[in-house]
Image (cartoon, rainbow, N blue to C red):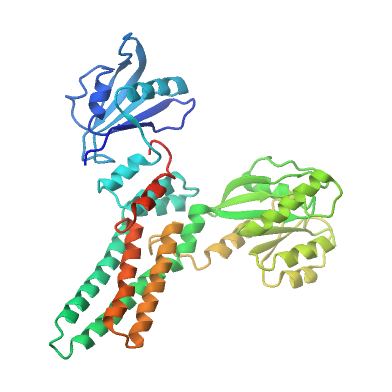
Amino acid sequence: MELDTIVAISTPVGEGAISIVRLSGSDSIAIVDQFFDGKSLIEVDSHTIHYGKLLDPKSKQQIDEVMVSILHGPKTYTRENIVEINCHGGIVATNRILQLMLSSGARLAEPGEFTKRAFLNGRIDLSQAEAVMDIIQAKSDEAMNIGLEQLDGRLSRLIRQLRQTLIETIAHVEVNIDYPEYDDVEEMSQAMMAEKTAEVYDEINKLINVAHQGKVFRDGIKTAIIGRPNVGKSSLLNTFIQEDKAIVTDIPGTTRDTLEELVKVRDIPLILYDTAGIRETTDLVEKIGVERSQKVMQEVDLVLFMLNYNEALSEDEKLIFSSLSNSKYIVIINKTDLIEQLDIDEVKEFAKNNPIIYTSIKDDKGIDELEHSIAQLFLSGRVKSNEHYFISNVRHIHLLEEAKSALEEAMNALEMDIPLDMVQIDVTRTWELLGEIIGETASEGLIDQLFSQFCLGK
C-alpha cells in the first residue's frame, strides 16, 4: 500500500544556524521541485545535495536560500523517497517552508511517523524503532551505547534466535503428535521440549538479571538530598553540578522548594532533588517545603541523608531514619572540618547496614567516596555492555518477565508429566511474548501508542 507524503520540521523550533524540514513519500521530490530554483530535483542522482533557492509560487519572491538533499527509496530511513531541506535556522523561515509544503499536497507528520514508516516498511523492527527514541533521550554515554546496540539489531537477533528455537520445538512436537506410530516418539519429544525450554529460559533469565543496569543508564536514578536545615544539602547539589545554582547561606530554611538537576556520577545519570530542610516549623512557606521534601523522599530511587558532624543527632533525624526503613539510602556525615559533636556509634546503629560517607563539602573532601558508593549500590557486579545484551526498555523487561513466567509453567508441567499438547500452550505463549518485543506479534493499537510518544520529525 502506497502511503501519502508527510512533512515535519526535524530540528528543534527556535533560533539556530540551520533548520531541517523533512519530507517522506513518493511525491516528496516533485513537491519540493516545483518551488526550487536550481537544478531539476527530479533528474538529479540519489543521495546528493543541491544548492538553490525556494521561491513563492505566486510572487516568485525568494523564501529562503537552501541546501536540498535528495534520497531515493528504498535506500532511505523510511524506504520511501526522502527530501531534506536545510534552511536558515529561525521560526519564521522554517515555518514558511513548512506551510509551503503543506499547501502543495504534503501532510503534517504525526509524532514518530517517519520511524513508524521505517518499521511498517520493514527497515527496522519495533525494538529498533524504540532504540531511536532511547538514543534521542540518552542521559549518559552508556545509555547512548545501549541504544546504538539495540538499533544495530543486537537484541533483535537474539530474540529471533530464541523464537526460532521455540518454534522448531513446537513444530517437532506437533509432527510427533500427528504421527505417533513409533513407541519412542513421546519420550523423544518430552526430552527435546525440556532441553529447549531450559535453554531459552536461561537466556531470558540472563537478560532480566542485567536489565536493572540498563534501566539505570536509560532513566537515571531519582535521588533526593535530605536532612535538617543548613546541613549542606544545597552545597552538595552545587558540587555535583559544578555551579552555584542553589542558594547557600548560614541561615536555616533558605531552601523553601525542591530544586531538580540532572548530573552524571561515574556515567550514571542522577536526577538530583535538593529539598527543603526537614524540621518542625511554624513558617507557612517553609512548612509547605518540608511537606514536599517528605513526599519526594518516598518517591525516589535513592536518598542521600545528610547529617552534621558538628551537631548531635536530633529527634527529627531519628524519625527520618525510621521513615527510610524501606528505602535505599546513603548517610552523609558532612562538615567533618568542624569539631565532632555527633555520636557516630548512634548513627551506625540507626543506619544499620547502609553506607556511611564522611565529607567536608567546604573542603571538597569525600565526594569521590560518595560517588563510588552510589555506583556500588546500583552497579554492583556490573556486566559490561559488550559482555551481554542490556535491556533498558520497561516494556521489554515486562514482556521478558511474562515470558519467563510462561516458561516456568511449561517446565513445571513437564516435571509433572502433563501431556505435551498442554505444555505446548505455555511454550507458544512465550513465543508470542518474545514476538511483541520486536513487533512481530504486536497489536496495531500498541504500535500506534508507542510511536505517539516520539517527537515530530523523527
Would residue 323 appear left or right of 261 to someone viewing this image?
right
- Answer whether residue 437 is visible to the viewer in this image: yes
Q: Position of residue 21 (x, y in %)?
A: 36, 28
Q: Position of residue 388 (x, y in %)?
A: 38, 64
In the picture as drawn, the residue positioned furthest to the right comes out as: 282
Name the residue at 25% across, 38% down.
3
Q: Quadrant of residue 430?
A: bottom left
Q: Is residue 326 above or below residue 308?
A: below
Q: Quadrant of residue 246?
A: top right
Name the residue at 34% across, 59% down.
436
Q: Quadrant of residue 401?
A: bottom left
Q: Is residue 65 above or below residue 394?
A: above
Image quarter in which the C terminus is found? top left
Would residue 300 appear left or right of 142 to someone viewing this image?
right
In this view, the residue in front, 457 or 3, is 3
In this view, the residue in front, 138 or 286, is 286
Would residue 432 appear left or right of 285 to someone viewing this image?
left
Q: Position of residue 39 (x, y in %)?
A: 21, 19
In this view, the residue in front, 223 or 432, is 432
Image quarter in which the N terminus is found? top left
Name the residue at 38% across, 47% down.
448
Name the residue at 24% across, 37% down.
80
In this view, the residue in front, 162 or 8, is 8
Q: Position of residue 86 (x, y in %)?
A: 35, 26
In the picture as drawn, the residue positioned furthest to the bottom comes out as: 183
Query: Count of labels shown?
Result: 0
- Answer whether residue 50 is visible to the viewer in this image: no
